Image (cartoon, helix red, strand yellow):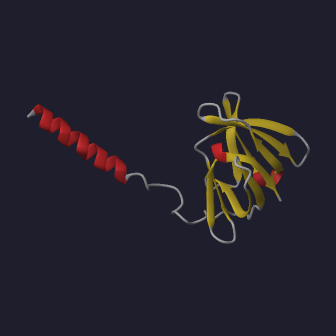
Amino acid sequence: MKNLMTAALVLLTTAVLMGMGSLGGAPEGEVPKTDENIKVQLTDRSGMKMELTRFSMNGKVFLEGKKGAGDMSVFFHDLKEIGFGPVSGDTVPADLLLKSGRHLQLSVRTGAVFHGDTGDGAYQISAQDVSRVQIR
């Protein structure tokens, strides 16, 4: 009887957790609405280049990451380019070139998702799969 109850509980928990997979974020196939139309050329780790409009990170028009022990965000309109280094655990290093000519380094979560419009459809990619972003 105890084994039957355990099996039923495991099955019920699995069913509930599987149903939560689509919660949160922008609907599939849709680019998040933002206050600014950021235009970029994104290069993924395979070398594929994509021209994107309405670019965002998790639906926001700024890059979020860790700077030391603190959190930092930098607006895309203040950036010229972002170069991503090799993935290390659950973060990827990002070298930011600001329009002022200064450089910043942040650690970005690998689970962060970039969104944009290709003109042919919605595009999304995880931070761990991005090599470079040039802001136009």
Judging depth in this view, the residue of 102 and 94 nearest the camera is: 94
Q: Residue 75, image x and y in percent? A: 75, 50
Q: Residue at x 76, y 52 (%)?
A: 76
Using the image, determine if residue 7 lies above or below residue 79.
above
Residue 27 picture location, percent across and down? 51, 63
Q: Residue furthest left?
A: 1
Tell how many labels: 0
| Image spot of residue 15 (x, y percent) | 29, 49
Determine the image quadrant of residue 69.
Answer: top right
The N terminus: image quadrant: top left
Q: Residue at x 54, y 60 (%)?
A: 26
Q: For residue 8, which quarter of the picture?
A: top left
Side of 77 relative to 87 (left or right): right
Residue 13 vs 116, above or below: the answer is above
The answer to whether 81 appears left or right of 25 in the picture is right
Which of 11/63 is in front? 11
Query: Which residue is at the far right?
Result: 101
* Residue drawn at point x = 70 percent, y = 35 percent: 86
Q: Is residue 22 left or right of residue 106?
A: left
Reply above or below: 9 against 60: above
Residue drawn 89% across the image and 40% down it: 102
Percent x, y of residue 48? 72, 55
Quarter holding the C terminus? bottom right
Residue at the extreme top: 69
Residue positioned most to the front: 46
In this rendering, position of residue 29 left or right of residue 37: left
